[in-house]
Image: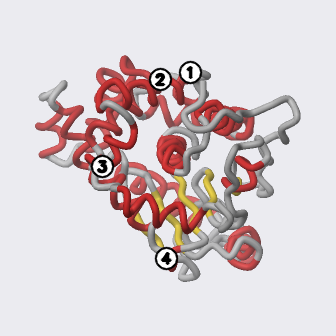
Amino acid sequence: MSVAGNKSASTASTPVPRSPFQTILNFRDIGQSINGLNPPILLRHGRIFRGARPDEASVEERKALVSTYRIKTIIDLRSKTEHVQQGKKHDAKVRKLASDVQSKSSIAPIKLPDFCYRDVSLNGSSYEKTLLKRLSKLIALMAVGRRTEAIAILGKEVIQPRGLVGQAIDVVDSSGIELKQIFDVLADPESFPVFFHCTSGKDRTGLVTLILLLILEVPLDIISVDYMASEGELIPERALRIQELKEMGLSEEFADCSPQWAMDVHEHITKTYGNYRTYFDRIGIDGALRHKIKSNILEASV
């Protein structure tokens, strides 16, 4: 199945590149990844990157983001709860190594001054309100500050039954404001090169990539190949991720990729909104904004 053009991924295509980093999993240049799959259009290399959280990256790897990949803007798609949990883990690591001067000097802060950070949670207030309508008892827990407990119940009783596709559909339907904020960044030539990520760089990052590649008119089967590449990339962290998912009330299914994910999310958009361009217009990613995004990412000859 192909959204745009007749050319799709072929047997002569190049495998999606593996992450060059040890601690930033699932990291790849979207232009390089897509161009290797023989699309009908070409993306510029070195403009936009996707991946998992860079929080545990070494000082050397963070330097590489600046010197090798020249990242200027980092868009963080994670929720407030995830930031709190990651902050606690980072603080615990610092305390554990506090007596070891050599080890302590190798620990970088979660955020560094080299980048312009844009925090845009795709599981933010709009998304949470949509889910809370299905489980009103969580409002009381949220009100008294028991956010982590509330999120675990929300995951088990609301998100888990929806599955990976349902979770993406809920973001599509409820997080238009946040998606518009992300693509406003991608419409600004001063933002590039851009690296966007969530926790694993798979689902929320995958959804932003899906929308971006639809804007760029990349065929859907190629989009799906790029999405599925995340499964192998995340094997080193799978056990840790499953534990984190359990804390959020979710099963190990959410650590994997669904082969039909891209197709099913696209089908929802077209059935619900008529076509993906109508959906983009509805959330404010209009034709003029899409043109700017294309100009920033596609090869100049396109």
Quickly name the residue at label 3.
281
Residue neighbourhood size for the residue with mark 1, other residues' Cα within 10 Å, grouped as few (<14), some (14–19), many (≥20) = few
Q: Is label 1 or label 3 in front? A: 3
Q: Position of residue 132 (x, y in %)?
A: 19, 33
Residue neighbourhood size for the residue with mark 2, other residues' Cα within 10 Å, grouped as few (<14), some (14–19), many (≥20) = some
The kind of secondary structure element at disc 3 is: helix
Proximity of marks 3 and 4: CB atoms separated by less than 8 Å: no
Residue at left 59%, top 30%? 2
User: Distance from label 1 to label 2 (Cα)?
Assistant: 6 Å
User: Distance from label 4 to label 2 (Cα)?
Assistant: 34 Å
Proximity of marks 3 and 2: CB atoms separated by less than 8 Å: no
The amino acid marked with disc number 2 is Asp
Q: Which mark is residue 116?
A: 4
Earlier in the chain: of badge 3 and badge 4, it is 4
The kind of secondary structure element at disc 1 is: loop
The vertical placement of 232 against 178, above or below, is above
Earlier in the chain: of badge 4 and badge 1, it is 4
Q: Residue 264 carries which label?
A: 2
Quickly name the residue at label 1.
260
The kind of secondary structure element at disc 4 is: strand
Is residue 240 something that shows in the picture?
no
Q: Quadrant of residue 288?
A: bottom left
User: Distance from label 3 to label 2 (Cα)?
Assistant: 21 Å
Earlier in the chain: of badge 1 and badge 3, it is 1
User: Distance from label 1 to label 3 (Cα)?
Assistant: 25 Å
The amino acid marked with disc number 1 is Gln
User: Distance from label 3 to label 4 (Cα)?
Assistant: 27 Å
Q: As drawn, is 267 to the left or to the right of 108?
A: left
Residue at left 34%, top 38%? 172
Proximity of marks 1 and 3: CB atoms separated by less than 8 Å: no
Closer-to-camera residue (4/31): 4
Residue furthest out toward the top: 161
